């Protein structure tokens, strides 16, 4: 511990603490721009000057490490004059456009200039001018005249995100923030640079000129767009969302979010959003009243109950409570266990705990991490930001998978292999774990490349054994939206609320659809899902023909909803209250941050109305509600008697072996209705190693036919040296590349024939 004196006050701090941090510990405020406690000190802005005895010049307090007996003066005349001079220099070319700047009202430069600046400028010369605003990406704008070269944004890309999205261009007084060759910014985390920019140089294209911070009403809530569940704030004015902001939560997202969380709310205002119930009459969907729609659904349920051919699919966009009510409606009122939230997802079960054995926040303290088939930035982006802090502190990370990911350059080792060699690779992992034993806390993260294999159970069992022997945490990373909340709400055929075993299991999503396609089905209730684009079109068309009543509940007229008999509009996650459970099992709260559109109900309210029309009522079990204590963690334990479903070997041939990848910015329903966010999506292409293209006389960028299981689709080829040989990477979630045509369940390792088109 170090003892020093600041402004006559004695303070004791840990060795290595800076003078700035020590002053903050005493409650003393010093102006600063470049420093942020999530990154090491840098000393770029020079505005945190203090006077230190026995030192001839003023010192930057953020870079000066405290030493024993040091005497510091923060409020001496020379220190105050030094800070005033620095602020005067910073304002020399600043446009002073506070009345129109988006940062106005929450701008550190504005505040520090008022508290510590000269109050009047001595300069009357013409200031620098740049083309403004400069669009850097579909969501980012740059006003270079405001930039004070604090380096927060460039250092974020270097130290936190690792994508080096922004960098300094030129040198000396010509230095500006930009990109190489003035290219568009490539980042999944650029919204964070807007948040940490202290002067309004970086602004959001979505929020720009829309509101002032003092006009906004903040609401704490949770982002539901991926299983991480980042804590966030919805800022609304007059009931309309103006912007989203990250909310500090050290256990989950710290202070960060991905761009999907920063900008992914505009779909709630899209003109195509459903505002009234629709009923099919004379072959077309026509607007109706809620009373008519609910009555018709109740009538169809009553008619279907005797045969037991009723099912509910979906639930990942719903709250935990809404999933509970939906499964209770089906089980208690309709008398069936045919419910499943895993539409388009793996429906296998195994004896391995789901989710994470450690917390997300603990990623920063890991000494080593092994990523098995996990494309972290595409599926769980903010977890990468937490893990990157571990690497910055000397931690190590190793990757094994079917293709190299965008974070490959930050990892200690990257091993790519063809699908089907997972068990062999795990033998290498065993050797690696033995060398890492005793070298600190470790974790294994398993992703969809390993999880969506036909022999998933065998792979997971071997991984679990390795983790237990090596005393490292096992983290099974899968899911979509609130899929863990749907599971714990009871939306699976063999598991009730809180993962309790069901004595008489129902059919899962694939079994329901296969049954409907082959035979007939009386009533199918699809809530917040789009099976029409998740399964082969021939199967879905048969399902639709054989289903007497199809009810779809969603925000938009999706491909599934457009073919429904009854369509019910619902509320988005920004408009309702409830609970969300993330990939680590943490319970988080949702609260409405915008005005609820007239004539619309939440999914839970619709289930209640429907139950009342059926002459009954829904209620919550007290034990279930007690389990949903905010910030509590529910560990999802496996059923020891569960069996692997469809655990078979995919037949091989001379084709390439497919691995189906999930991307953050796809063409899903909500993305397509988000005007700025959809521009971040890339054209879907099938990626192969250049050697595979040469073998087949296929050129980079050419159009090919991909065939599997008797179905053929057209795709554009992209050469990628990071892809394993004999492998083809196919992205999910794009109508332009309908890979769902290859089968009801897309196993990695599926053989794909690639044929050059003429």
Image (tube, rainbow, N blue to C red):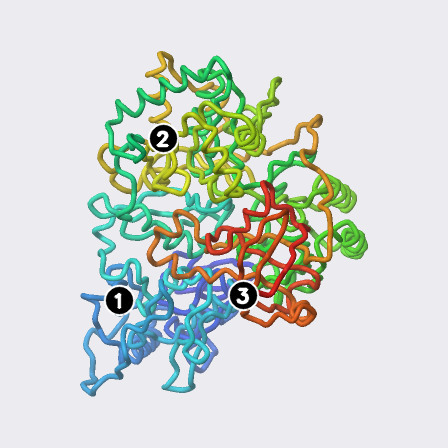
CA gap between label 3 and label 2 equals 38 Å
Q: Nearer the viewer, residue 475 or 342?
A: 342
Q: CA distance from mark 2 to mark 1?
A: 58 Å
Q: Position of residue 487 (x, y in %)?
A: 54, 32
Image: 59 above or below 190:
below
Mark found first going from the N terminus, 2 or 1: 1
Dot 2, crowdedness within 10 Å: few (<14), some or many (≥20)? many
Q: Secondary structure at mark 1?
A: helix
Tell me: residue 629, above or below residue 272.
above
Horizontal placement of 384 versus 418: left or right? left
Which sits earlier in the primary sequence, circle 1 or circle 3? 1
Residue 505 screen position, x and y as percent: 60, 22
Q: Which residue is mark 3?
A: 703
Crowdedness near tag 1: few (<14), some (14–19) or many (≥20) residues, C-alpha within 10 Å:
some
**How many C-alpha atoms fall within 10 Å of the one at disc 3: few (<14), some, or many (≥20)?**
some
Q: Quadrant of residue 724?
A: bottom right
Residue for badge 2: 565
Q: Position of residue 706 (x, y in %)?
A: 59, 57
The percent coordinates of residue 536 (x first, y second) are 53, 43
Disc nearer the start of the sequence (3/2): 2
**Separation of marks 1 and 3 at Cα, in angstroms:** 55 Å
Image quadrant holding the N terminus, namely bottom right
In the picture, residue 36 is in which quadrant?
bottom left
Q: Residue at x 30, y 42 (%)?
A: 593
Q: Nearer the viewer, mark 1 or mark 3?
A: 3
* Label of residue 110 in the image: 1
> In the image shown, does 478 or 679 lie closer to the viewer?
679
How many numbered marks have been drawn onto this rendered protein structure? 3
């Amino acid at each position: 511990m170090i003892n020093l004196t600041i402004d006559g006050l004695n303070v004791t701090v840990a060795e290595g603490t800076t003078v700035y941090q020590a002053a903050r510990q005493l409650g003393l405020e010093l102006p600063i721009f470049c420093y942020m406690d999530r990154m090491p000190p840098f000393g770029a802005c020079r505005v945190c000057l203090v006077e230190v005895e026995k030192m001839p010049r003023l010192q930057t307090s953020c870079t000066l490490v405290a030493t024993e007996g040091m005497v510091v003066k923060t409020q001496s005349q020379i220190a105050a004059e030094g800070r005033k001079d620095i602020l005067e220099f910073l304002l020399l070319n600043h446009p002073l456009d506070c009345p129109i700047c988006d940062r106005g009202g929450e701008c550190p430069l504005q505040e520090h200039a008022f508290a510590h600046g000269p109050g009047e400028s001595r300069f009357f010369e013409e200031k620098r001018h740049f083309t403004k605003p400069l669009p850097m990406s579909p969501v980012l704008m740059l006003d270079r005249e405001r930039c004070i070269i604090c380096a927060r944004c460039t250092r974020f890309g270097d130290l936190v995100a690792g994508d080096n999205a922004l960098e300094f261009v030129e040198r000396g007084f010509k230095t500006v923030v930009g990109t190489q060759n003035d290219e568009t910014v490539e980042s999944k985390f650029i919204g964070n640079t807007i948040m940490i920019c202290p002067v309004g140089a970086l602004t959001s294209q979505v929020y720009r000129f829309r509101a002032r911070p003092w006009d906004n009403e903040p609401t704490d809530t949770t982002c539901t767009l991926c299983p991480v569940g980042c804590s966030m704030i919805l800022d609304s004015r007059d009931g309309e969302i103006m912007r989203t902001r990250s909310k500090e939560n050290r256990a989950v997202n710290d202070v960060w979010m991905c761009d999907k969380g920063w900008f992914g709310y505009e779909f709630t205002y899209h003109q195509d959003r459903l505002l009234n119930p629709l009923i099919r009459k004379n072959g077309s969907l026509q607007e109706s009243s809620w009373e008519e729609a609910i009555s018709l659904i109740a009538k169809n349920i009553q008619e279907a109950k005797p045969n037991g051919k009723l099912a509910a699919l979906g639930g990942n966009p719903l709250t935990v409570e809404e999933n509970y009510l939906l499964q209770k409606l089906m089980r208690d009122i309709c008398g069936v266990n045919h419910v499943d939230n895993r539409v388009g997802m793996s429906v296998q079960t195994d004896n391995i705990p789901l989710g994470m054995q450690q917390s997300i926040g603990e990623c920063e303290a890991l000494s080593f991490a092994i990523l098995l088939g996990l494309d972290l930035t595409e599926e769980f982006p903010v977890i990468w930001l937490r893990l990157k802090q571990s690497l910055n502190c000397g931690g190590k990370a190793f990757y094994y998978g079917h293709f190299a990911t965008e974070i490959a350059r930050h990892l200690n080792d990257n091993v790519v292999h063809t699908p089907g060699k997972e068990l062999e690779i795990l033998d290498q992992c065993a050797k690696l774990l033995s060398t890492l034993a005793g070298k600190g806390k470790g974790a294994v993260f398993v992703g969809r490349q390993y999880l969506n294999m036909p022999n998933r159970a065998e792979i997971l069992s071997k991984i679990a054994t390795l983790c237990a022997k090596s005393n490292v945490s096992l983290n099974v990373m899968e899911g979509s939206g609130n899929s863990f909340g749907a599971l714990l709400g009871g939306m699976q055929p063999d598991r009730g609320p809180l993962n309790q075993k069901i004595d008489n299991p129902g059919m899962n999503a694939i079994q329901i659809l296969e049954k409907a396609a082959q035979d007939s089905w009386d009533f199918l209730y699809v809530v917040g899902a789009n099976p029409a684009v998740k399964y082969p079109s021939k199967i879905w068309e048969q399902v639709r023909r054989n289903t007497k009543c199809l009810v779809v509940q969603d925000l938009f007229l999706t491909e599934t909803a457009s073919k429904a008999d009854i369509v019910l509009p619902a509320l988005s996650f920004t408009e309702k209250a409830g609970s969300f459970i993330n990939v680590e099992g943490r319970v988080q709260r949702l609260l409405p941050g915008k005005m609820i559109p007239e004539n619309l109900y939440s999914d839970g309210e619709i289930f209640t109305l429907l139950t009342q029309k059926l002459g009954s009522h829904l209620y919550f079990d007290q034990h279930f509600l007690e389990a949903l204590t905010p910030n509590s963690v529910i560990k999802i334990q496996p059923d020891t008697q569960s069996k692997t479903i469809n655990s078979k070997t995919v037949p091989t041939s001379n084709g390439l072996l497919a691995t189906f990848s999930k991307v953050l910015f796809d063409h899903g329903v909500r993305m397509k209705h988000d005007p700025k966010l959809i521009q971040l999506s890339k054209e879907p292409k099938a990626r192969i190693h250049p050697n595979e293209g040469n073998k087949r006389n296929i050129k980079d960028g050419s159009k090919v036919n991909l065939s599997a299981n008797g179905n053929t689709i057209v795709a554009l080829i992209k050469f990628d040296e990071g892809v394993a040989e004999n492998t083809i990477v196919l992205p999910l979630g794009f109508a332009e590349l309908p890979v769902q045509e290859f089968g009801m369940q897309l196993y990695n390792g599926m053989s794909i024939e690639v044929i050059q088109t003429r």
